[in-house]
Amino acid sequence: MITQPLHILQCNSTGGDGCINHGAGHATQPIHVRVAEATPSKWADGIVLRATSDGWIGIALFGPDDTADSDTATVWVWNHADLTAHLSAGAPVALHSVYNVLASGRSRISVVRL
């Protein structure tokens, strides 16, 4: 079930200047990183199953997660950027369930969770 308005799944890129949007799935705001790191119990570890060039990332989370798709046990998130070079299948990640931040190594990526 989609709970986010679909208009946030669009990016208003200005070419070389990057994205000018500030919502979920676009630029990661420092406050989101800080509050996510201040609530460590809300992180769920997972493995990237698939990343697409249009921003979709499929993640298999470890442990119980009642928001995962029950048929495939895959959680889908979206980011405006093509992260296929950074998030290959099998890459370890962590997803914050409250602040919609995806951690991959030292990178923190703002995502929309569907």
Image (tube, helix red, strand yellow):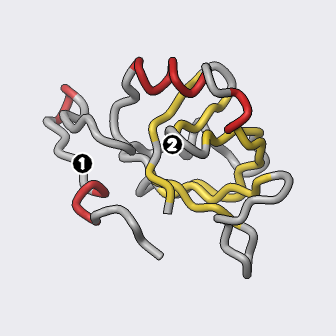
The type of residue carrying mark 2 is Asn
Above or below, comparing residue 40 to residue 44 in the picture: above
Specify few, some or many for label 2: CA neighbours under 10 Å numbering under 14, 14-19, or 20 or more: many
User: Where residue 12 sits: x, y (%)?
Assistant: 17, 45
Which residue is at a point 63% across and 32% down the rendered structure image? 103
Q: Name the residue under label 1.
A: 11
Q: Seen from this angle, which residue lies furthest right? A: 63
Foreground pick, 84 / 45:
45
Give me the residue at 52% from left, 55% from top: 77
User: What residue is shown at x 77% (from left), y 47% (from top)?
Assistant: 46
Q: In this view, does 43 lie to the left or right of 86?
A: right
Q: Where residue 45 sits in the image (x, y, percent)?
A: 77, 42
| Front residue of 56 and 6 | 6
Q: Residue furthest bottom?
A: 71
Asked whether, in this view, residue 24 is left or right of residue 73, the answer is left
Viewer-side label of 1, 2: 2
Q: Which mark is residue 100?
A: 2
